[in-house]
Image (tube, rainbow, N blue to C red):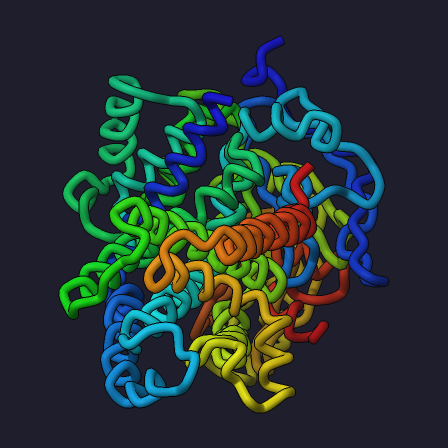
Amino acid sequence: MIEIANHVALISRRSLVRTARQPGTWIPPLTFPLILMAVNSNGLRAATHLPGFPTRSFLAFFMPFAFMQGALFASGIAGTDLARDIDTGFLNRLALTPVRGGALLVGQIGGAVGLGAVQAVLYLAAALAAGVHIDAGPAGAALILLFAIGTAAGFGSLGLWLALRTGSGEGVQSMFPLLFFLLLISSMNLPRNLIEVTWFRDLATINPVSYLIEALRSLVIEGWNAEALLLGFGCMLALMAVSMVLAARQLRLRMTRT
Amino acid sequence: MSARAQGIVVEGLVRQFKGVLAVDGIDLTIEPGQIYGFLGPNGAGKSTTVHMLTTLLPPSAGRATVAGFDVVADGPSVRANIGAALQETALDPFLSAREHLRLQASLHGIRGERRLRLQDDLLQRVGLTQAADRKVRTYSGGMKRRLDLALALIHGPSTLFLDEPTTGLDPQSRAALWEEVGRLAREEGVTVFLTTQYLEEADVLADRVGIIDHGRIVAEGTPASLKAEIGRSTVEVVPESSAELHRLVAILGRFGTETAARPGAAAVRLDGKGGLADVVRALDQEDLRAAAINLHSPSLDDVFLAKTGRKLEGAAEDDA
């Protein structure tokens, strides 16, 4: 166990260092969501006048979008880095060491998780500076950070699976629009009960991203909503578990060492 | 028996990929401390063989032991005793040489003072001490290959696999790498399995050579014995005057059997009745002026040609 933990730490360290040394990798995830958050919270402010809208602050309502978009970037980072390792043969180099497949995977998302943590702190700080009030208090803010990091890890694991499946950075990046589409057909811009178009509302209802967003949102604008939190955390853990299982299975196929 | 005292034994090794037989029943034995050159054109099965022997690919059939451990049943033990510098340099462009060595050593359980000492020693041996803290993406091809070799050696393996290690290197870097590989085998008793498509590399470095084509070993032995197997040297002479060609053929005929030559020249395969010096002396005595005299010793390319009917250089293009 100690050896496995040590290997996870070593691979994570490498992943973090690599991510930190690629500004082109972490500048967009830190800035684009903030820009979109600022633009949309001003442009869609009138939505707060809709009967039944849960808050007077559209920024408070829309804030979780930044965390979700950041998590999608995490999938790209983790996946692209692993795809590069496959392409350059570095995965073979790691395969020739005593490192186990599971430790390799968990370590590989180290960079994405690290960036996810920085993103979460930045988005939360920006929102608080812009006047957003966290109804769930400091404990809620801490849970927001934890949830955001977990979501980054979940999407990061999805990126690993895509990398192992496709073996190419282009393959990973080509999935980004699909993942972004999931974000668009969610309760990102309106509460589900206020979405008038039936098919859109139905899609948003079956879309797990809606529950991820609503869990975060509930901490900001409602306080402690057990149902929203359970659904959101459940979806987050399911995402992590399913992605990791898929990635582990794909790693066994790709790293066919005896 | 320690791992360093055991070499490589391969019996009937086969690897098939969806109907393509990449390796078609290879048998070989490499003594500990030997440098074995595995020579063949692109697509012959060299890298596939290396991947099987380094446990990265399970064989479809057959058996192999490396450093005394079965490559299928004892994968982890094999990996603990081998180092490999594969065809791709497999480096992270965003890490420095020192960071690479640190990661590799740590993953092999080497820590603390011992790790630092090994890092510094290897950096010095491969000539990367000055560049140790620069990111690898700033390195030349030769520097990357040297780092690749250092990474393969950090944990003190008894067996080293080098898959076309000097491809793309300048002559100076190539010579430096050869020197280090030779030293490893000579002074540290490391068994080296080296694949190459460069005849000179196999000729200079290898104690024994196996020539592979279409997944099968077509010839095996020391470079000298393989070349001697297919014949002696050939002398080709171009007379200053084309009118002297018939007389030239008669003179050369005293030293061996006539063989194919360029237009306007005559050639003979020496059969032990004399060497180049004797031929030159005879031409001088007969007052026959030569515009050019070429001595052609058999090469491994000639061995490949004799065994397969094709030249090694260009064999891959022929198969494409």
Furthest-top residue in this view: B1
Side of A56 relative to A93 (left or right): left
Above or below — where is A136 with respect to B108?
below
Above or below — where is B11 with respect to A222?
above
Residue occupying image coordinates x 68% and y 42%: B52
Q: Is residue A123 visible?
A: yes
User: Which quarter of the rendering shows the C terminus of chain B?
Assistant: bottom right
Q: Is residue B173 visible?
A: no
- For residue A101, which quarter of the picture? top right
Q: Position of residue A258 (x, y in %)?
A: 69, 36
Residue occupying image coordinates x 55% and y 49%: A237
Q: Position of residue B225 (x, y in %)?
A: 65, 39
Q: Position of residue A148 (x, y in %)?
A: 38, 55
Front residue of this view, candidates B271 and B185: B185
Furthest-front residue in this view: A51
Side of A181 relative to B49 (left or right): left
Residue occupying image coordinates x 60% and y 48%: A241
Front residue of this view, candidates A105 and B26: A105
Above or below — where is B282 with respect to B106?
below
Q: Position of residue B255 (x, y in %)?
A: 63, 54
Residue occupying image coordinates x 33% and y 58%: B141
Front residue of this view, candidates B25 and A161: A161
Count the marks: how many?
0
User: Which quarter of the rendering shows the N terminus of chain B?
Assistant: top right
Above or below — where is A241 with respect to B289?
above
Side of A62 relative to B243 (left or right): left
